[in-house]
Image (spheres, rainbow, N blue to C red):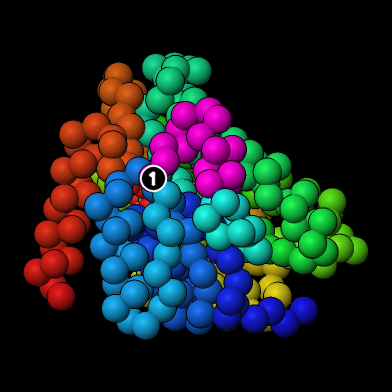
Amino acid sequence: MQRTIAGRRVLITGASSGIGRALALALAAKGARLAVAARTESALLTLAAEITAAGGITPVVLVTDLSVPGNAEALAHRAVTELGGVDILVNNAGVGCFGFQWNVGDREEGREVYETNFWSPLALIRELVPQMRARGTGLVVNVSSLMQLRTWPGLGYYASSKSALAAMTETLRLELMGSRIGVMELLPGPVDTQFLSEAAHSPGARHILKNLPIGDTEKLAVAAVRAIEQGRRRLVYPRRLVAALYLPMLVRFKAARTVRGAAADIDVDDARVLRSGSAGDPVARQARAEWALAHRRAS
Ligand SMILES: NC(=O)c1ccc[n+]([C@@H]2O[C@H](COP(=O)([O-])OP(=O)(O)OC[C@H]3O[C@@H](n4cnc5c(N)ncnc54)[C@H](OP(=O)(O)O)[C@@H]3O)[C@@H](O)[C@H]2O)c1
């Protein structure tokens, strides 16, 4: 099914940086009317100004913390009020936490990952899909991760939250089969963002990342917009990693040595439990600041 983006009302979470920001710019360039959501208001306002300056429709800025239960529901209401409805929901906001299971257990840090990466997308779906069904049209785009196929020590909360989101995305597609509401899963592999710069600091990461292609947010956004227009169900980016989706056992087998290398490189007595993201622990925020500085210098 071909889709046009011009004039569509889009709610996109996690638009203040990285992949979400690039998606917002690419969708606005196609004429979408956006509501952009995240915690960092200044970054959302900068994005809104950039879109306006480029001739796009000025987005509505919605500041919210999706790690807090109830906020996703409120966000959906605000987006509907501001835009008059939501035609395309992009569930992109995501965080991780670093810590071994015997230290994190069901602590707040682990629960926050699930609230942001899993429960908030579902809350937004619960609020917005019934309205799409009533209109007989709509699209849900869930940003999962190729880490749904390959976890690594200390990052199980992130990987499992993305596996859970991927399973619910596939379920939603089946539930909406026969309707005119589309469901697309965007599966990024490593993409050069502040989030990846944090992940790269986690123990064992150098083993995992060393042989992987690192993608670029703008190219990802161009490919994602094309996939939305073409009515695709899934997009793996970078494309070189598409085999991971269709031959997961082979990929697991091939990656086993690397992951064993990573596992051997970690200190199991490391009792740290670290939040990622712009509101994360100092080590995460430092990695993000270094990334931002290096990218400012390069541009
Ligand atoms: N980069 C990669 O290699 C990679 C690979 C696979 C999947 N992904 C997924 O791609 C998505 C975007 O990640 P990214 O790489 O672009 O990282 P990023 O630059 O850190 O972006 C994450 C976005 O999520 C928002 N966010 C995080 N916690 C939030 C919260 N509690 N409430 C509201 N918004 C929140 C952040 O905004 P604020 O901090 O301003 O709230 C930011 O806009 C995530 O779902 C991530 O899991 C990334």
For label 1, the SS is strand
Rendered view: 41 above or below 87? above
Spot the residue most to the right. 178
- Type of amino acid under label 1: Val
- Quarter-of-image position of residue 3: bottom right
Dot 1 beta carbon under 8 Å from ligand 1: no
10 Å crowding of disc 1: few (<14), some (14-19), many (20+): some
> Residue 198: x percent and y percent?
28, 46
Q: Which residues are magenta?
A: 63-78
Q: Which residue is mark 1?
A: 63
Quadrant assignment for the N terminus: bottom right
> Residue 122: x percent and y percent?
65, 41
Residue under the point 35% across and 60% down: 18
Rendered view: 47 above or below 101? below
In the picture, measured across the screen, residue 178 lies left or right of residue 247, that is right
In the picture, measured across the screen, residue 287 lies left or right of residue 83, that is left
Residue 88 visible in the picture: yes
